[in-house]
Image (cartoon, rainbow, N blue to C red):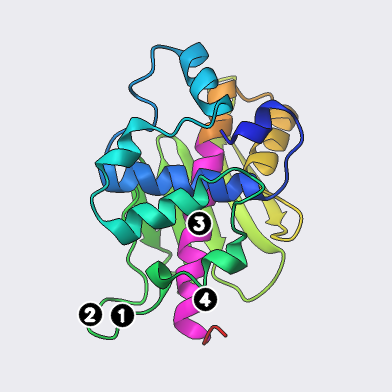
Amino acid sequence: MAPELYTGNYNELVDIYAFGMCMLEMVTCEYPYSECQGMGHIFKNVSQDKKPAALYKVKDVEVRSFIEDCLAPVAERLSASELLKSPFLQKDESISVPPISVSLVEIENVTRDDEHSDSFVFRKGEFLLKGNMEFTNPVHLWLRFPDPYGGFKTAEFPLDEAKDTGLSVAMEMAEQFELPQGSIEIITELIGAFLLVLIRYWRSCVAMP
């Protein structure tokens, strides 16, 4: 979690921090702060702005620089619109790739919904999130999740990119449906994965300024 979450004074930039951690896990295939001995050790490192040891294993200068921008202190952290201008996210004409190609560590399945060509399904364990690649705000998402009584529930909800964060939505759902604490992290990761695909989809359809 971003350092400012521990103070209770945070905004949408916590999602940028979470995105950076997700990228770090993707490129190193290890959990950030896995070197720490327990949650207390992690809290101490995060609150003191000590970066995960995994960051220093990233050899690609451009990738590491982008992740560092995401993990910067909140006063220096770039917004989503600023990050979109990063050279790391610009299209490389010399490489031929499909419009959407995503591999996310710990997100077990990212598939296109055959019934709705502009919908994608994300799965982690027993959690399943479906979202539409729409040029609208809010974006509408659908989540299936295990309930505390051994069954499954579904919820459809809007994600307002101007006001909501993946974490805030996950915390609200956990409170509303009495989900265990571990569900918050899973739902946040799924929403983050959806937003990553959404950004790449929009960039493939619209020329960014």
Q: Nearer the viewer, residue 199 or 40?
A: 40
Q: Are marks 1 and 2 in contact (CB under 8 Å)?
A: yes
Check disc 1 and give the amino acid type: Asp
Residues in magenta, as a range: 186-206
Can residue 28 be seen? yes
The mark nearer the N terminus, 3 or 1, is: 1
Secondary structure state at the residue bearing disc 1: loop
Secondary structure state at the residue bearing disc 2: loop
Residue 202 has which mark?
4
Q: Are marks 3 and 4 in contact (CB under 8 Å)?
A: no
Secondary structure state at the residue bearing disc 3: helix
Identified at 47% across, 30% down, the residue is 50
Residue on which disc 1 sits: 92
Q: CA distance from mark 1 to mark 4?
A: 16 Å
Residue 23: percent from left, percent from top:
39, 49
Check disc 4 and give the amino acid type: Trp
Residue 95 has which mark?
2
Q: Are marks 3 and 1 in contact (CB under 8 Å)?
A: no
